[in-house]
Structures are given as C-alpha cells and as structure tokens.
Amino acid sequence: MPRTSREWSDEELHEAIKAYLSMLQQESENRPYSKADVNRSLREGPLKNRSKSSVEYRMQNISAALEELCLPRIQGYVPAKNLGTGVRDRIWNFLIEEGVYLPEEYAPTADRHELDEKTKSLRRKIVPGIPKGIETPKQMQATTLSFFRDPLVKAWVLNNSNGVCEGCKSPAPFTDIDGFPYLEVHHIKPLSEGGSDTIYNTIALCPNCHRRSHNSSDKVEFSDSLSNSLFRPLLN
Ligand SMILES: [Zn+2]
Ligand SMILES: [Zn+2]
C-alpha cells in the first residue's frame, strides 16, 4: 500500500526531479511525452511507496521551486507553493546538482562589471517571472582606481556643443537642474585603454548616443564615425 505521510527521502526527491527535468527538456523541444506514463513508471520504480497524487504534488512543488528562481517550468504542473520545511532547499540542492541552477550566478554583487556579466548570462536563461530582489541593499566600502579628470575639458566640450548632441545632432533631451542642456561627455578612446582627457578625445553626447557608443552591436563603427566627424580647433 502506498504510504504518503512519511517524509520523502533524498533519493525519492532526486528521482522526481530528474524525471521532471527530463519532461521539461522534452517540452522545450516540442517533443510529446505523457505525464501519466512518467508518474506510473516512477511508482513502478524508485517511488513505489508513493501514491499517484503524491507524485503529482511533488512535481508541482518542483514547479514552484523553479518559478521562485525565475527558471522555466512545465506548464502543466501548476506551482504548489506549500513546499514544507526544508523541501525547497533540498529541491534547490538537486537543481544545483543537475546543473539547472547555479547559485553564484544569482549572488548579489557590488561590482558593477560583475553585475553586468551576471545580468547578461541570466538574461539568456531565465523566463519572465517576478524576482524577489533586495529590499534593503547592503553597501560595500570599495577602493576603486579612478582617473583624474580635467573639469575644464569637460566644461569646454559641453559648452562647445551648444546643447546639441555631437553624435545625432539632436538637441539635448532636457535641461538639467542647473539650467544647462543635458548632455554627457564621452571619451572616444577609453581612459582605461590609454585614451586622453583632452577635447580631442571627448565628445558631448545625448544619453542615447552615449549608451550606443558603449553598448551597441555597432559601437566600433559608431565610435569611428564619431571621431571622424569630430570638429575641434587646434591648440596654438
Ligand atoms: Zn545623440
Ligand atoms: Zn562614455
């Protein structure tokens, strides 16, 4: 007789998760499979002490655990969030073991570059879901290397632009709190790559063009076009 009251062993849980992930894989590849068949073969094998509905409910628990991580789940298994003490952690541990969930990828970071990298890799992996986030983010005392910048160069480039973006030639999108047209100063060759902080390497850009010059797929070509079109008086 199937007994459902006893707590699931690690082995039982692991078998359920492996079966779930294999169905998920088939679903993602649009290959047909039968939940009822999988349920039955689990009860004929490693889950012989469990009832049909108990196996079904575990599958829904696994959906809930995946959903909390914003990872894809099997659509037919509506998340059952009542995971019980420790069950969520045990499911997550097996998801780690199966390579589905990499905790370090989810770990908060104070490093801007690391954050960008993690964001990039998670975007390729997660589905729309609602991340819990950090209600009260901690602060970290950081020692960063910063470059000395010449305020005069920055002021000159901004004033010289007359409030017009030197990239797209559009007017600054708004006026800043000091009453200046809002544009950003960009280094065509980054300071970190040996670029200078002079008016010959700096350009006033609207936020769109500035982001484009850092993040777009055509940033190299865009940057070249910026430096080619840059007009600057020569120092005498
Ligand atoms: Zn622009
Ligand atoms: Zn920039």
Image: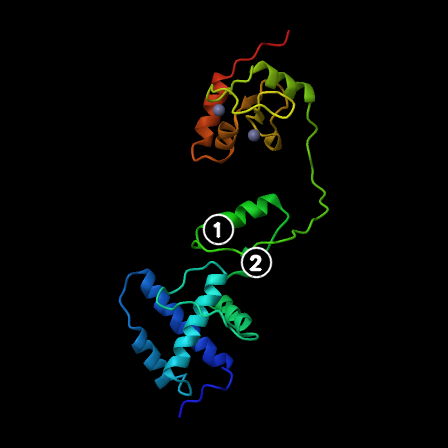
Q: Are marks 2 and 1 in contact (CB under 8 Å)?
A: no
Residue 101's x, y, as percent?
Answer: 49, 62
Residue 155, quarter of the rendered image = top right
Q: CA distance from mark 2 to mark 1?
A: 12 Å
Outermost residue toward the top?
236
Residue 204's x, y, as percent?
Answer: 56, 22
Disc on res. 121: 1
Residue 93's x, y, as percent?
Answer: 53, 70
Q: Pick the quarter of the image with the C terminus.
A: top right
Q: Is residue 3 left or right of residue 118?
A: left
| In the depicted structure, whether residue 201 falls above or below residue 234 | below
Task: Please name the amino acid that badge 1 sits on.
Answer: Ser
Which residue lies at the image location 49% right of the left edge and 36% below the top edge? Answer: 215
Sort mark 2 into few (<14), some (14-19) or many (20+) by Cα contacts within 10 Å. few
| In the depicted structure, whether residue 232 falls above or below residue 222 | above
Q: Pick the quarter of the image with the N terminus.
A: bottom left
Sort mark 1 into few (<14), some (14-19) or many (20+) by Cα contacts within 10 Å. few
Which residue lies at the image location 64% right of the left edge and 48% below the top edge? Answer: 110
Outermost residue toward the bottom?
1
Residue 3, quarter of the rendered image = bottom left
| In the depicted structure, whether residue 130 falls above or below residue 168 | below
Task: Please name the amino acid that badge 2 sits on.
Answer: Glu
**Is label 1's Cβ within 8 Å of ligand 2?**
no
Residue 198's x, y, as percent?
Answer: 63, 20
Give the residue pinned by disc 2. 104
Colour pattern: rainbow
